[in-house]
Amino acid sequence: MSSKYLRDSSYIDGKWFNSKSNRYFDVLNPATGTILSRVNDIEPTDVELAIQAAERAFPSWSKMTSKERASIMRRFYELIIENADELAAILTQEQGKPLSEAKTEIIYGASFIEWFSEEGKRLYGDIIPSPIANSKIIVEKSPVGVCAFITPWNFPSAMITRKIGAAMAAGCTCVVKPAHETPLSALALAALAEEAGVPKGVLNIVTGTDSHNIGRVLCDSETVRKVSFTGSTDVGKILYRQCAATVKKISLELGGNAPFIVFPDADLDAAVSGAIICKYRNAGQTCVCANRFYIHEDVYDKFASKLADKVRKLKVGDGLDKGVDIGPLITPDALEKVRSHINDALGQGAKLIEGGDTHDLGGSYFKPTILGNAMEGMLIAKEETFGPVAPLFKFKDIDDVLRQANNTQFGLAAYFYAKDLALINKVYNGLEYGMVAVNTPILSTEVAPFGGVKESGIGREGSKYGLDDFIELKYVLLGGLE
């Protein structure tokens, strides 16, 4: 793979950095199994260099006016847009999603840099009327400091920009640890940031396979004042515990188990089209993908038939090929998890409606799958499958489906289709989720707060609320004012 933004080293203090260990790891194309690049495998001890660089850069970056930071970030945004096709090609080859989806991710990711560059200008403080004579209460907002970000492989560009956009706009400096499966998109962003004039040390990218110990360095550091992680709930809990020792701010965007509910008055064609997008994009490998489909018994058979007709037409293949709808799963292990969920469901009485096995292309390609007669005790009802499998559950009434939908420790995203306004009001109020989409399959946007409740996480990303975790409030009491 060739690209002017292709890099094979960490980016620390404005320089491309190779660890003295001289170890490298292979970045594979999941569509072909071929090696795309060999990237320097940084030592956990080298991460401290990135933390120190961010610490040195913090005073000058934080003291810039918000307008000055916005100008640099605006140029960063423009360069991402100008090079969107090239960035999308890198992303597709290291992650596997179709090129059209990769391009959408690049544009979506860039929107956070643009949004926060403007929103940072509106970090207003307050003046509070004082109950004490001849005094004034001032509340100022100041940046937290050095922030560490650990990002996943399924959205290797957007999960970085969604975090660093808010941090940089608030005046913070950043150390990013991307997933070792997909470091190339992160390094390409660093190259663009450098070209945009982001000062050295403000954005640092550390690449390595020793995720546990790199994470430990970031969490244990007294210099790092904020950690943000997107990934599994199990890992998030580990990081949460590790951050407790230094009482860091922490944001966690963790696992999901999204319900997709279809009521009898729904527009079935719209619901089916929404299900295709919500379930099968990125081969089902998103934390907000629908994981459980609850279909009212009156429309169950019709919905299942319409969904199967659409699924049969989905094209599986290399994301670079024209017309491909579904690419490969990220690794063979991911494929085995999908297979295990399907086998468990079939063993407990589920009915195979469509797909159900590896694709003829081999590798980690899997056929888009529909299972009927799904039940609550199945693994697929309790765990996040992270693959192209739609299990269909029947339900009878609102209370029944709300109980089933909420019967999980997760609470990230939920979807439902209905027309009756009273019903809609009752359902979205009854769903225990941080985000609810009604009659639409896509809810992510830079202007809305992204995040979950229960064990799906802490904090919000995007929107004006996305700046909150990157600021500290300082209360100043001015006395002696005559």
Image: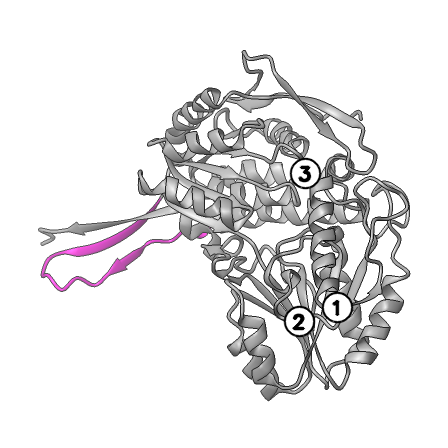
Q: Which mark is residue 375?
A: 2
Q: Which residue is mark 3?
A: 80
Q: Amino acid at mark 1?
A: Ala
Image point 63% across, 60% down: which residue?
Answer: 379
- Residue 122 is inside the magenta segment: yes
Nearer to me, 265 or 65: 265
- Of 296 and 199, nearer the camera is 296
Secondary structure state at the residue bearing disc 2: loop
Q: Which residue is mark 1?
A: 350
Q: Is the residue marked by circle 2 packed among few (<14), some (14-19), or many (20+) residues within 10 Å?
A: some
* Whether residue 202 is visible: no
Q: Are marks 2 and 1 in contact (CB under 8 Å)?
A: yes
Residue 59: image quadrant is top left
> How busy is the neighbourhood of tag 3: few (under 14 within 10 Å), some, or many (20 plus)?
many
Which is nearer the N-term, disc 1 or disc 3?
A: 3
Q: Secondary structure at mark 3?
A: helix
- Is tag 2's residue or tag 3's residue first in the polypeptide sequence? 3
Residues shaded magenta: 121-142
